[in-house]
Amino acid sequence: MLTSTTISASFSSSMGIFKTSNWRLRASMEVFPSFLPKEVDKIKDPFARKLASRIQRLPVELTSSNDCIMSSCVKPIIETSANPLVLLHGFDRYTTIDFKYVQFNFLGMFTHFSEVAISREREILALLEPILLFIYVVEYFFSFSSSCLEWRYTLPLLEQAGFETWAIDILGWGFSNLEKLPLCNVDSKRDHLYQFWKSYIGRPMLLVGPSLGAAVAIDFAVNHPEAVDKLILIDASVYAEGTGNLSKLPKFVAYAGVMQKTLIIWGEDDQIIDSKLAVQLHCELPNAIIRQIPACGHIPHVEKPDAVMKLIKDFIMTKSTVPLVRKQEEKELVRQLE
């Protein structure tokens, strides 16, 4: 099994880059598709580099606009008879975001340090002029975070656990060809995901949505229940009560239609979405269980990939029902928190 140490040892700053018409090839035999931004060559995180080399584009015909979108995704490396995992990603509805959240992702994507080294790097960056750092972060962060690369740490663990796993870029984000981008609203996102599922997956999936990707997952499950076996929501941003600019989002009201068994994962130290909303979501979904990850923020699949993989694995493998008594107790807890 490859570890971060063995992977990073294969990289060398002295290695050149060879270009072909369709791919960018490093002398280390890393191959990047040519449609990725040129900044991909600057990524030092070996897990991000590995996943970036696997990104493909597949044609998806949209019924809502009659457009064909070359849609970016990471395809499974194994096929099983079980229903596949399909990973969506978070995305930023607005450009105003939490600075510490960006900084964490920036360090994780473009450097490969130990936790101690990352801590020291944070201290150094804290001394820099904030505006200069912000410009540098925005240039790279928005190109890579709101995409399938968000799963650079957790997706390999899921594959090692034996799961057939897809990672799909949501319409309007990631690395799809957006030259003919249609109106990018809830309906078009749903249509795009459905047409992708219909063309390439074709059987019920375990749909995973983090942050705002959870809203896309819930909407899809309500409108296409035949395509979704189970839901997994990670620090879901689905309420108008979210902090900052998230408060401007319309409240999601379709929970009554979600009948799939659902796992809600929440970072205990999430500074973006209040934890009481996790409890509220749990109470409103009729067939949900909730699990919290300690010492973890808004992006558990980046911060605590081993914990997220284990929770997903246990959820898939365990055949249990949701105790009604516990749901009633949590409804009372929500009323106390309000």
Image (spheres, helix red, strand yellow):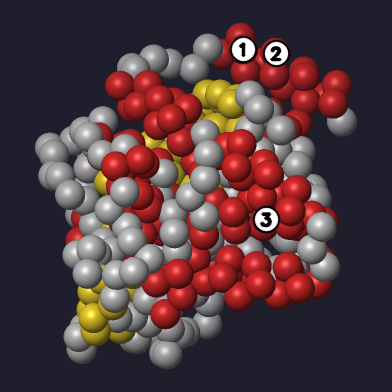
- Residue located at (77% from left, 19% from top): 333
Task: Give the x, y percent position of residue 50.
Answer: 31, 56
Disc 2 and disc 1 in contact, CB within 8 angstroms: yes
The numbered disc on residue 103 is 3
Which residue bears the numbered disc 2? 329
Does 13 sit left or right of 81 as displayed?
right
Label 3 neighbourhood size at 10 Å, few (<14), some (14-19), many (20+)?
Answer: some
Residue that extends furthest to the front in the rendered view of this protein: 14
Residue pictured at 32% horizontal, 58% vertical: 11
Q: Which mark is residue 296?
A: none
Per the model, the C-alpha gap separating discs 2 and 1 is 5 Å
Where disc 2 sits, the SS reads helix
Nearest to the observer: residue 133 or residue 175: 133
Q: Residues within 10 Å of mark 2 (few under 14, many from 20)?
A: few
Residue 224 at x, y percent in the picture: 38, 53
Is residue 24 rendered to the left or right of residue 336?
left
Indicate whether 157 appears above or below 112: above
Earlier-in-chain disc, 1 versus 3: 3
**At label 3, which amino acid type do we have?**
Gln
User: Rounded to the nearest whole Å, what is the CA distance between mark 1 and mark 3?
Assistant: 38 Å
Residue 32 is situated, as x and y percent measured from the top left of the image, at 28, 71
